[in-house]
Image (cartoon, rainbow, N blue to C red):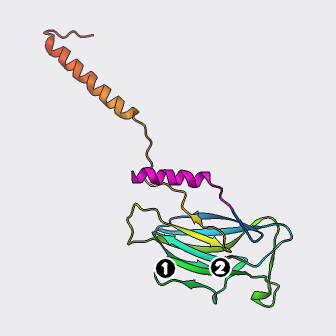
């Protein structure tokens, strides 16, 4: 039953749109990994329309059966260390990134001017919580700029079932044929060669 509910949840995530709009930006994400140490890397993108300004990601990260490993800078957006708060249990954080214009004199004076293309605005790593069951899905939810929660989940499925019964039918049919041949050969006193 639990696996069936997990399957339904994964199918619902595939049907839902992969973008969230807020404050002039459209958000999307990508999950890489896990690597050899079981660490996932999540990248949050913002698409800002041509000519619009964007200051950066400002929101929350909330983990489910997952622990936050770290929050990194991206090429254009740096983590505002004064606004970053990672809870002691490593399951949630408040994070703000600011645009790092190489031509600006100060970090907080810069605003990103949109080009209509997506840019990395936040990058973080997480891993499965060892206190949770190994079969439980681990994911993070990000809430950018006060928008409704949005889940970051890996695209892999655990132990996918094919649902095919054809191999079992073939095995049963083969055993049945062997059984019939044995019974017929026992009743017959002579076995003819072909």
**Image position, residue 32 (x, y; %):** 57, 64
* Number of marks drawn: 2
5 inside magenta stretch: yes
User: Mark 2 highlights which residue?
Assistant: 73
Q: Nearer the viewer, residue 145 or 134?
A: 145
User: Mark 1 highlights which residue?
Assistant: 90
Q: Residue at x 65, y 74 (%)?
A: 122
As measured in the structure, the alpha-carbon distance from the residue carrying label 1 to the one carrying label 2 is: 18 Å
Q: Residue at x 78, y 82 (%)?
A: 101
Position of residue 122 relative to residue 106, above or below, is above
Q: Residue at x 65, y 79 (%)?
A: 73
80 inside magenta stretch: no
Residue 71 image-quadrant placement: bottom right
Q: Secondary structure at mark 1?
A: loop
The crowd level at tag 2 (other Cα within 10 Å; few <14, some 14-19, many 20+) is: some
Q: Residue at x 23, y 19 (%)?
A: 180
Q: Residues in magenta?
A: 1-19
Q: Nearer the viewer, residue 114 or 41?
A: 114
Q: Nearer the viewer, residue 64 or 167?
A: 64
**Image position, residue 56 (x, y; %):** 72, 77
The crowd level at tag 1 (other Cα within 10 Å; few <14, some 14-19, many 20+) is: some
């Amino acid at each position: 039953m639990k696996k069936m509910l997990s399957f339904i949840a994964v199918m619902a995530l595939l049907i839902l749109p992969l973008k969230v709009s807020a404050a002039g930006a459209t958000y999307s994400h990508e999950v890489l990994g896990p690597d050899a140490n079981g660490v996932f890397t999540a990248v949050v993108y913002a698409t800002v329309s041509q000519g619009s300004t964007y200051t950066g990601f400002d929101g929350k990260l909330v983990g489910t059966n997952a622990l936050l490993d770290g929050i990194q800078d991206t090429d254009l957006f740096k983590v505002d260390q004064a606004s970053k708060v990672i809870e002691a249990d490593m399951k949630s954080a408040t994070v703000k990134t600011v645009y790092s214009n190489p031509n600006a004199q100060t970090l907080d004076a810069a605003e990103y001017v949109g080009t209509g293309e997506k840019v990395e605005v936040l990058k973080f790593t997480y891993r499965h919580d060892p206190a949770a069951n190994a079969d439980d899905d681990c994911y993070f939810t990000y809430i950018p700029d006060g928008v409704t929660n949005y889940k970051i989940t890996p695209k892999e499925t655990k132990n996918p079932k094919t649902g095919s019964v054809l191999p079992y039918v073939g095995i049963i049919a083969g055993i049945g044929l062997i059984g019939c041949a044995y019974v017929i050969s026992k009743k017959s006193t002579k076995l003819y060669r072909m």
